[in-house]
Image: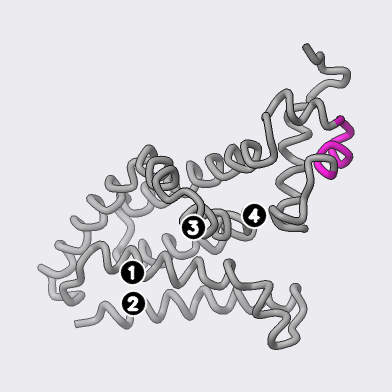
């Protein structure tokens, strides 16, 4: 059995893996890279996490838990409707830069093992968020503030509008010859565009 030779080895491996996945992508990061960056060794990584994919799943679960908790809290809050929509979208734009590999992980899992991905997401009970959102939509429709919109359509629209810029950011920066720094600045402005676009689409 491997014993920790230095304090906090497991935590350092997690922190280093997050940084490397963000910098180099999943495919561009090896177990040895993670071990070196965390001042550990390959055996430590395999002992604590089993494999690179298992390590990434832990990071994915952490990010997804944070996302579900934040969105659920926002949708189930007493915020005015338009402010609620803005905060919901802002949550994606705040969280995804910290975990930019999450959208690509979801995409790869859809192709590799869709049943496992569905099971993983279902365990987080996203239906609770849709239930909260449905109630808010009904209230706003009754007041005449918005037009009737299927709750799932709204959820998918917001999700796709927020995820796409992070899923294909690397391709976009290379295609239009823009630096990553400038692209990140563009995303800050794009967030407000998404908010305005969604709210305009809901108007009666």
Residue 95 in sight in this render: no
**Percent from the top left, x then y, of residue 72?**
36, 48
Q: Is residue 125 left or right of residue 137?
A: right
Which quarter of the picture shows residue 203?
bottom left
Mark nearer the viewer, 1 or 4: 4
Q: Are marks 3 and 1 in contact (CB under 8 Å)?
A: no
Can you identify the residue that label 1 sits on?
Answer: 82
Can you identify the residue that label 4 sits on?
Answer: 98
Whichever of labels 2 and 4 marks the residue nearer the N terminus, that label is 4
Q: Tell me the element at label 1.
A: helix
Q: How far apart are marks 2 and 4 (CA)?
A: 26 Å
Mark nearer the viewer, 1 or 2: 2
Q: Tell me the element at label 4.
A: loop
Image point (17%, 77%), residue name:
147
Q: In this view, does 55 lie to the left or right of 91?
A: right
Give residue 150's mark.
none
Q: Is residue 158 magenta?
A: no
- 85 to 172, vertically: above or below: above
Mark nearer the viewer, 3 or 1: 3
């Amino acid at each position: 059995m491997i014993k920790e030779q230095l304090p906090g080895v497991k935590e350092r491996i997690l922190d280093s893996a997050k940084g490397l996945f963000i910098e180099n992508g999943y495919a561009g990061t090896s177990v040895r890279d993670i071990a070196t960056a965390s001042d550990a060794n390959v055996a430590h990584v395999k002992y604590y996490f089993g494999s690179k994919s298992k390590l990434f799943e832990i990071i994915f679960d952490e990010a997804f838990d944070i996302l579900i908790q934040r969105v659920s809290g926002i949708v189930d809050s007493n915020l005015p409707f338009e402010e609620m929509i803005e905060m919901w979208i802002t949550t994606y734009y705040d969280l995804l830069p910290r975990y930019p590999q999450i959208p690509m992980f979801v995409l790869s899992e859809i192709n590799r093992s869709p049943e496992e991905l569905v099971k993983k997401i279902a365990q987080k009970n996203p239906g609770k968020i849709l239930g909260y959102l449905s109630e808010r939509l009904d209230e706003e429709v009754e007041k005449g503030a918005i037009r009737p919109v299927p709750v799932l359509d709204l959820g998918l629209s917001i999700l796709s509008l927020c995820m796409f810029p992070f899923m294909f950011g690397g391709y976009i920066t290379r295609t239009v010859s823009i630096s990553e720094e400038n692209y990140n600045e563009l995303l800050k402005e794009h967030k407000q565009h998404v908010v305005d676009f969604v709210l305009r689409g809901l108007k009666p």
